[in-house]
Image (spheres, rainbow, N blue to C red):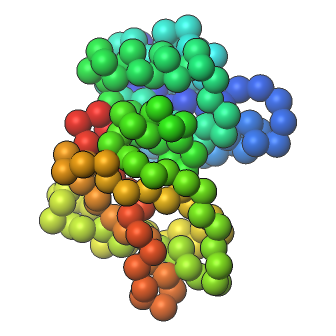
Amino acid sequence: RSEDVALVAASGSGGENRTASETAGRVADFLAEVGVPVSVLTDQDVAAGALTGHKMAIFVYSPAMDEATASAVEEYVRAGGKIMFCYSIPPRIATLLGMADVAYKGHTTEGQFARIVFDQKALPGLPAAILQDSWNIQSFRPADASTKVLGDWQAADGASSGPAVCVNQNG
């Protein structure tokens, strides 16, 4: 195995898991286009210890992570692995990433979550912003000073809608 990055797709049947698998495939293709090879794993692979040897694991959409998978992710982080979660995140994993008060938040006005605006001083190479136009998000606040917010949600009218992206020692 030469891939440092694992891309994790939820397994199982049903609409949410199908969406998760399709999203993981698109992200894997995008990363390949920019020269980042990935190992594509399922949550079942993760539960069986397949993250061992990877430097980073990206969970593009994990709508219903089971206990065995969450435990394996915690062990992976304890062993020095880094994680990245997009959108849905189990509470115990949010704690690993220094996120508090994580909650679903639906939009109340059109364009409320139009883009993510980044603090370009926080991490070299970040774009100024990315367009997103989400209908809903997982809101959060940094749990403590070790969690740095890299980007905030911005509405179409320019109003801030809270943190969107954070980083800490675990990912």
Residue 117 x, y percent position in the rendering: 36, 72
Answer with left or right where residue 17 lies relative to residue 54. right
Q: Is residue 13 above or below residue 120?
A: above
Instruction: Identify the residue at horizontal 29%, vertical 58% (top origin).
Output: 149
Residue 148 x, y percent position in the rendering: 24, 54
Answer with left or right where residue 7 lies relative to residue 143. right
Residue 6 x, y percent position in the rendering: 46, 27
Instruction: Identify the residue at horizontal 38%, vertical 47% (top origin).
Output: 99
Residue lying at the far bottom in this picture: please name it: 157
> Can you say which quadrant of the picture contains the C terminus?
top left
Instruction: Identify the residue at horizontal 33%, vertical 64% (top origin).
Output: 151
Answer with left or right where residue 45 lies relative to residue 167. right
The answer to whether residue 37 shows anywhere in this view is no
Residue lying at the far right in this picture: please name it: 14
Q: Is residue 108 above or below residue 130?
A: below
Residue 79 x, y percent position in the rendering: 29, 15
Instruction: Identify the residue at horizontal 63%, vertical 73% (top origin).
Output: 107
The answer to whether residue 68 shows anywhere in this view is yes
Residue sitting nearer the eye, 95 or 2: 95
Looking at the rendered structure, the number of numbered marks drawn on it comes to 0
> Can you say which quadrant of the picture contains the N terminus?
top left
* Quadrant position of residue 122: bottom left
Residue lying at the far top in this picture: please name it: 48
